[in-house]
Image (tube, rainbow, N blue to C red):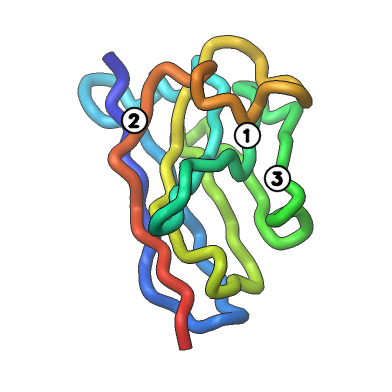
Amino acid sequence: QVQLVESGGGLVQPGSSLRLSCTASRFDPSELDAYHVGWFRQAPGKGREGIASISKNAGRSNYAGIVKGRFTISRDSAKSTVYLQMNNLKPEDTAIYYCALRTSLPGASDWWDEGEYTYWGQGTQVTVSS
């Protein structure tokens, strides 16, 4: 079973940037390279929502409209890490952010579907506040 670790969260002011990282722990970190990856978030009192996804070869990505143009998902195969660069953060971006893995290629109609993702991390808290 793949175990995921998210990092990079924190408390920042509106307009700031953060970069979240997602890595696979346990025996072989390169396990991450075999999967398509999604980032999700859950704000207090709300359900979990899809933010972005990236294919395992980094050739295709998808974004939620609310973050498009501010967030960028990428992956570095040499480091077996997936990133979520978040710019111009707003208070409404406050949430726990999770990365997740899936084996089927994320498409425009299902990249945000939690049920398609098999492995999940424990999340990292992002708080945007002045």
Q: Which residue: 60% across, 22% down? A: 56
CA gap between label 3 and label 1 equals: 9 Å
Number of the front mark, 1 or 2: 1
**At numbered mark 2, what does the secondary structure look like: helix, strand or loop?**
strand
* Mark 1, other Cα within 10 Å: few <14 / some 14–19 / many ≥20: many
The mark that comes first in sequence, 2 or 3, is: 2
**Marks 1 and 2: CB-CB under 8 Å?**
no
| Mark number displayed over residue 42 | none
- Relative placement, left or right, of 23 versus 90 is left
- Residue 53 in percent (x, y) is at 63, 34
Number of the front mark, 3 or 1: 3
Q: Which residue: 75% across, 28% down? A: 60
- Residue 24 in percent (x, y) is at 34, 30
The mark that comes first in sequence, 1 or 2, is: 2
Q: Which residue: 41% across, 70% down? A: 127
**Location of mark 1 (residue):** 53
The mark that comes first in sequence, 3 or 1, is: 1
In depth, the one of 31 and 4 nearer the eye is 4
* Mark 3, other Cα within 10 Å: few <14 / some 14–19 / many ≥20: some
**Location of mark 3 (residue):** 64
**Location of mark 2 (residue):** 24
Residue type at the position of mark 2: Ala
Q: Which residue: 59% across, 25% down? A: 113
CA gap between label 1 and label 2 equals: 16 Å
Q: Is residue 109 above or below residue 87?
A: above
